[in-house]
Image (cartoon, rainbow, N blue to C red):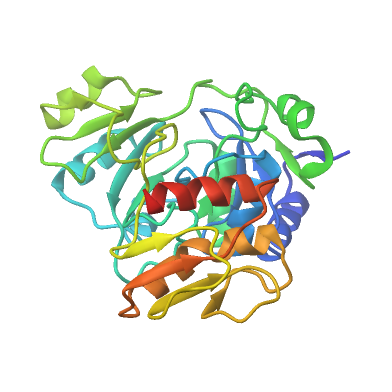
Amino acid sequence: MNIQAFSPEILEQACHLLAAGDVVAIPTETVYGLAADATNDQAVAKIYAVKERPQFNPLIIHCHSAQQAKQYVDFDARAEQLAHEFWPGPITFVLNRRQDSDISFLASSGLDTLAVRIPAHPMAQALIKAYSKPLAAPSANLSQTISPTSAVDVRASLGSRVPLIIDGGNTRVGVESTIIDLTENVPVVLRPGGVSLERIQEVIGTVTLGGHGAIKAPGMMERHYAPSVKMRLNVLAPLPGEKYLGFGDMVCDLNLSSSGNLEEAAAHLFRMIRELDQSGTVAIAVAPIPNHGLGLAINDRLQRAAS
């Protein structure tokens, strides 16, 4: 049985799984999360694979404290005020990524912003503190199915795909966290959730309700980070001057996976696009990617980047 009651031994087991690049289902006050090491590209790719997530939406990064979060994102006065009022709790801040942040770019869908929050559940807090690194953790269910509010819900949705489900009982809030974008002059609530718009306005004043435009958070489905140069897809041979992003056994500048492994390709995708974009090239050519499994998500992301 992969559902286990919380104990020091289970906490140690969870840390071992996370360090090995695996996933662990954890309770939070909102819904159960499918957690992995947010600094490990391969571990983050496993989240998408386990959930069968068709698009690389940004994932929420869970930290144990505001002090830990500040290692990865730049706080402003509004973030400080909201953190003081609502953290730990069901509200996520979208903030600019620090230059020295080692959070996986796959976890942020290649963006220069990160969605961060501090969960209020004591078991989630204990695991993040014990592991000492932030955890990427979307809801622990198959993509486009109902979010889980109990350990049994997680097992019903994901079954043996998750080696460990930590049982924290039924979640208290039962809906996902509010997501607020604090990178704009006027903050924008991108997703309503566990903290109301009115309560936020009481703390920082004017806030708008959005969710349209550039994707910055889960649940937004428009264009993601795109390179500054032209990108061509499904290319069998690059043109002179193009950098070639390969897949499988081929000659290329960078290879998403020389063995043709889609999970490995997903883990490398955003970092390699950035490397080629910053190489001084005039254009990027991308080899064909199989359009099944995680290949669907990779091709979705590439099509948005090339649009």
Residue at image coords 46%, 67%: 285
Residue 61 visible, this orientation: no
Give the camera-side residue of 259 and 133: 259
Outermost right residue: 1
Does residue 207 sit above or below 82 in this rendering?
A: above
Does residue 202 appear to the left or right of 229 in the view shown? left
x then y, percent, for residue 251: 61, 82
Residue at image coords 56%, 52%: 298
Q: Quadrant of the N terminus?
A: top right
x then y, percent, for residue 155: 78, 31
Does residue 101 appear to the left or right of 136 in the view shown? left
Residue at image coords 34%, 56%: 226
Residue at image coords 22%, 32%: 188
Does residue 19 appear to the left or right of 92 in the view shown? right
Residue 136 visible, this orientation: yes
**Number of numbered discs overlaid on the protein picture:** 0
Give the camera-side residue of 55 and 69: 55
Quarter of the rendering containing residue 153 = top right
Quarter of the rendering containing residue 268 = bottom right
